[in-house]
Image (spheres, rainbow, N blue to C red):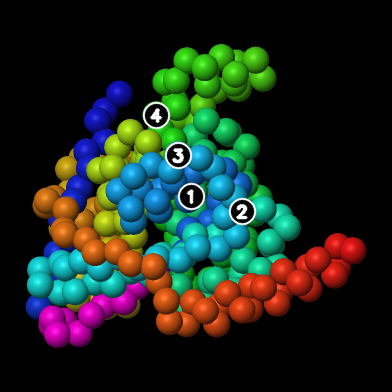
Amino acid sequence: MKERRSCHKLSLKSGMDPSQSVKCKIVVVGDSQCGKTALLHVFAKDCFPESYVPTVFENYTASFEIDTQRIELSLWDTSGSPYYDNVRPLSYPDSDAVLICFDISRPETLDSVLKKWKGEIQEFCPNTKMLLVGCKSDLRTDLSTLVELSNHRQTPVSYDQGSSMAKQISAPYIECSAQQSENSVRDIFHVATLACINKNNKNVKRNKCDCDDDDDKDNCCDSIGITRRSPPTRNYEAYQGDIEDFHNLVVENIMISEVLVI
């Protein structure tokens, strides 16, 4: 199998004001337990979560510099539970990119990309850049996972299957293992950052990456302008500000949901 080389450098053309921060909002969606929270936890806290705790909504910020230009990411973790389908859309307004995550060890979560997530994003934020993220890539060769899937006559999602789905939704495709590779997680957010900057500023420099297969170019890092470099220094803190207002809206809608269920 051809190696999928990671690409790290984020480069901007002149014209942006270094004294002004570039702010990008990234929303992470996908089926329950597909790896969304672990992805964000590793990126924001540099450690893999020891236990699974269902997420309703969680928010962080990440700050770093690209060619002396300060970038501030607002990261929104969401619940994939159908119970919160009427609440989750509150996270979409003003988003610059949406990461649609699926679990490589659970093929049904890839099916949900077309059945659920693409339509939801097109309804609530049709102009937002989408990126497809295959999570838990380490389980593709995990023996117990292979045996369990074999008992149901299934196999893990292949890279080609993920890439094919990405083409169907016109999105770049990236894989990661939050448990085994922090670099793969960092690549996800480097690509997402370039998607945000490309959407908001036309001065992003288009650079050539190492993907030399023509079939890869529409769904690789080159399509949004990434080349290699050492990762930037990051600084994280719990996101505050208008998140409190957002959480109030969430609580109100959850109460409405409970009334409707009753």
Pointer 1 residue: 36
Residue visible at 30% across and 48% down in the picture:
46
Q: Does 209 lie within the magenta span?
A: no
Pointer 4 residue: 138
Mark with earlier residue (2, 4): 2
As drawn, 171 above or below 183: below
Could you tell whether 235 is left or right of 54 in the image? left
Q: Which residues are magenta?
A: 15-26
Mark with earlier residue (3, 1): 1
C-alpha distance separating marks 3 and 4: 17 Å
- Type of the residue with mark 4: Asp
C-alpha distance separating marks 2 and 3: 20 Å
The part of the image, by quadrant, that contains residue 160 is: top left
The part of the image, by quadrant, that contains residue 140 is: top left
Pointer 4 local density, CA inside 10 Å: few below 14, some 14–19, many at least 20? some
Q: Nearer the viewer, mark 3 or mark 4?
A: 3
